[in-house]
Image: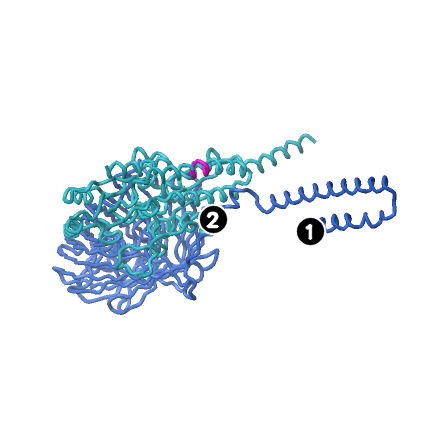
Chain colours: A cyan, B blue
Amino acid sequence: MSKWKILLGAAMLCVCAPALAKVEVFACLPEWAALATELGGDKVSVYQASNALQDPHHIEARPSLIAHMRNADLAICTGAELEIGWLPVLLQNAGNDKIKPGQPGFISASDFVERLEVPTRLDRADGDVHPAGNPHIQLDPRNIAKVGMVLTQRLQQIDAANAAYYDARAKDFQARWSQAISRWEKEAAPLKGLRLVPYHKDSVYLIKWLGMVEVMNVEPKPGIPPSAGHLSDLVGRLKGGAADVITRSAYQDPKAANSLAEKTGLPVVELPYTVGGTKGAKDLFGLFDDSIARLKAAKK
Amino acid sequence: MFRKVTLAAAVGAAFAVPVAAFGADDAEVQKIRDEIKDLKESYENRIRQLEQRLEKAEQPAPAAASAPAPTQNAPAAANAFNPAISLILGGQFNNLQQDPKTYQIGGFIPGGDEVGPGSRSFNLGESELTVSASIDPYFSGFFVMSVNSDNEVEVEEGYVQNTGSLPGFTFKFGRMLSGFGYLNEIHQHAWDFVDAPLVHQAFFGGQLQEDGLQARWLAPTPMFVELGVETGRGTGFPGSDRDKNGVNSAMVFAHVGDDVGNSNSYRVGASYRTTKAQDRAYDDVDAAGVPVTNAFTGDSKMWGLDFVWKWAPNGNTVDRNFKFQAEYMHRTEDGDLAFDTTGSNQSGAYRSSQSGWYVQGAYQFMPRWRVGLRYDQLDSGTPNIGLVSSGALTAADFPRLADNDPRRTTAMIDFSPSEFSRFRLQFARDEARFNEADNQVFLQYIMSLGTHGAHKF
């Protein structure tokens, strides 16, 4: 009789054990790692596949990434072909059914937001264009909120035992987040109409959200580095007050933006782009605090 | 549904009771009214409870219920299911000091068709057409067709893959580039030099393809640990078609890899492969200089070690990065060698033990620009030829198998206007022939059209 009790106990332990294990989250990019930490708390273990100083288009499909993809319960990436140069290799080699596209364990964040700049003409002559639109969606905080809702839902689906926990964390985060959005919108009111020259087309969501204007880019075409000739052409076009600030993201080489700033007299602002890009961008809140503060400082 | 039925019953009861109570006195009416009131309240309570339960059932969690649905702007055209297609256009201009028709890797039995520097002047390289897509939820298909400058079409790869049906497992079947070592699995257009290392040319005749199946298992560890097996028809050099049932080659391999800090990552691997050759013919001349055809029949066993190290400051490869790569291979062939198969046709035992290696580095010193250096060396050893040790023939009857240490030094510089185009200039001093050096200059272009291909580590 007692033997049976022990066996039953062991069986129950086996049933309960998966609920005790943390949900392994593979986050392609720092912003999604930060979001998973906010929403998953101590019920998830988050692996961040890249950092803010790495160009998200060009991450090496390193063995360590494949190993972590193999062990993931949930993978969250931007999608819209941002990770096209490396994510397919990870998915093909990971041997993990849980995180295949179409499964609850795979989130392509850009599927759940309204993407800007969806090209009407697809031609590589226009540079490295993304057919699904501009993939740098994380710089509109309203997109973060939307992706957060999807992430909460998926966490609840994958780890049903902790559904209430995720619900509580989601409510708390979403409340703080929407307060922060109203605060940012107030703080950034003076930035309305600010004319930007970003290095790459990776700030369009921030620009649109805050009512700023993208005059042109330092890159001649997306993904094509500027040549000396192109830079001197830009200097000519920027003379006469056509723009207010030049911006570049933390992962981009400062040389081109700096030399352009020197020749035009325009200030150059380094934007964090994602969590960890600057000292101030410690988490998702810091990302927007710091981006807005840096732009405001340059405007003065 | 249930809610509607309960409601109807409640309403029915409320009307039915007063009709039945017609004609009773006031006290009784009051009593009945109270009863009805109680009944009503109890029904209303139940209805409320049911409604709440229903609501709960419909929405498992408030946060989940409000999660946005995917935005819909996918193309709805009939061709939406068309597979991903990409085309590689490649070509080169070669300047070769020695006549390429005399090219040989001295000391090694030749085989395969991708040996040597190619022809002089302008050459259309291999044009590679890749088509890939998911087949269904279980399989994906991958097809690479190459057309060479002689208008010969070849299926370079054509395999079906399943990944994840068993945790950590990836299965491939069809024709694939063999998983032996590191470089063999990588398509030519993604190489850092125009041509294959000498050791690949000598041991595989270029790149080893396998018609068969491959299984890989990835260990559930934070470190990358991969084990694999591969087996197949084994017709590619150094094997040959044996017209037999069953399989003709077997291979095992293991890879281990990890990151070292943010800036470095590596992969090391080991492979062992065995295959058989039957009447694997090659051309030579005898001691008198008369052309003869010889043929090997027997076992060909190989093992290899491979190592790749990549560096990029903070892991950001865009501005600067460095890739170091090295492979060592050893091959033992054991069997019979037939001399002059169309003439005297003498046969005797044959055993060779040969090795080769290369090291190479490619450094991107600024966006778009890379320089690279490679060194190749082979050791042919002196094979044991039964016909020679028995005195039937002399070593001079097998001039191609004389002891030789082929070597080559290669330098390259390449420029990539975008990630889809690349131009490369390469110089090589090739000492693969016996006592004769060849200075080679290549000017190459590689262009990629269509779907953005992801690259392996």
Secondary element under disc 1, as helix, strand or loop, is helix
Q: Is residue B79 magenta?
A: no
Q: Which residue is nearer to you in this view: B285 or B215?
A: B215
Which residue is denoted by mark 1 in the rendering? B4
Relative to A17, B37 lies left or right: right
Chain at tag 2: B
Answer above or below: position of B211 versus B61. Answer: below
What's the amino acid at mark 2?
Answer: Pro
Percent from the top left, x then y, of residue B95? Answer: 13, 60
Which residue is denoted by mark 2 in the rendering? B68
**Callout 1–callout 2 Cβ contact below 8 Å:** no
Residue at 64 percent across and 35 percent down: it is A8
Chain at tag 1: B
Secondary element under disc 2, as helix, strand or loop, is loop
Answer above or below: position of A117 versus B123. Answer: above
What's the amino acid at mark 1?
Answer: Lys
Answer above or below: position of A289 versus B397. Answer: above
Q: Which residue is nearer to you in this view: B7 or A50?
A: B7
Query: Magenta part of the protein: which range?
Result: A173-178
Percent from the top left, x then y, of residue B259? Answer: 33, 38
- Residue lying at the far front in this picture: please name it: B26
Quadrant (top left/top right/bottom left/bottom right) for the N terminus of chain A: top right
Relative to B233, B196 lies left or right: left
3D distance between C-alphas at marks 1 and 2: 31 Å
Q: Is residue A176 magenta?
A: yes
Percent from the top left, x then y, of residue A230? Answer: 17, 52
Quadrant (top left/top right/bottom left/bottom right) for the C terminus of chain A: top left
Q: Is residue B239 visible?
A: yes
Q: Is residue B260 visible?
A: no
